[in-house]
Image: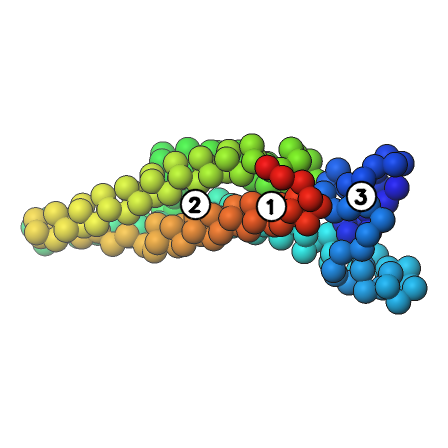
Amino acid sequence: MRCESCGKDNAEGSGFCKECAAPLGQVSAGPAAEALESGEKPSRLARFISTAWSRKGPILMAFFVVLMMAVVFAPWAFLKLDVLGFRIISNSYNGWDIIVPRILFFLALIPLIVSLMLIAGVGTRRRVLETHICTFFAGVMFTVWVTMFVLSKVISSVVKNVRVLALNVSGGQIATIFLLLGFIIGIIVTTYDRGQLLEDAGIGG
């Protein structure tokens, strides 16, 4: 029995879809639903859009995690050393040259894998475990990035007072913090959508 909401195949006689928890035999809102109501068979594009919309939370999560991982390879800082009139200017280097961003890059693989599993429809029924895992890693990464940003500002302030070393930190930390906020929004959307589906299906908890 195919779910009219997300297109997932279910066992015959099932009352609710094992993927989206929508009542089987009833059509939910979306392009596929509109096509069925008009007596037409929904196109692949309509089914794809309906499925993608029902999984917009995990898609947002994966999108922002990938962007965070990409920021690690962006130019990170510019270092200028001025001692007694002799200047040494370093080349721009990226976050991969720094140990902490490198660790966080591999750490981000875990929420990325969880997000991709949710997009593929693999996971627990209520998505509680998955969202808890992603929230934990989001909190860890957010705390580390904010700490690094604060420390970089402190170091820059000390360097300016010494007037020997000039250090300009790029916006990599700021960008990553905003991307982490987007990732957290994806977690919230995932939780809300799943709760709405279960409520519409009459399933509590």
User: Is label 1 in contact with label 3 (beta carbons under 8 Å)?
Assistant: no
x%, y% of residue 191? Answer: 56, 45
Which residue does the image show at 69% across and 44% down from the upper left? 202
Say which quarter of the image contains residue 204. top right
Label 1 or label 2, whichever comes before in sequence order: 2
Q: In the rendered view, how is the structure colored?
A: rainbow
Position above or below: 41 against 138:
below
Looking at the image, the residue that sits furthest to the bottom is 38
Cα separation between marks 1 and 2:
34 Å
Nearer the viewer's eye, disc 1 or disc 2?
1
Q: Where is residue 151 in the image (x, y as percent from the top left)?
A: 23, 43
Residue 181 as seen in the image, left or right of residue 34 = left
Q: In which quarter of the image is residue 141?
A: top left
Q: Mark 3 points at which residue?
A: 8
Residue at left 88%, top 67%?
Answer: 38
Foreground mark, 2 or 3, reads 3
Q: Name the residue under label 2.
A: 72
Secondary element at tag 1? helix
Quickly name the residue at label 1: 195
- The crowd level at tag 2 (other Cα within 10 Å; few <14, some 14-19, many 20+) is many
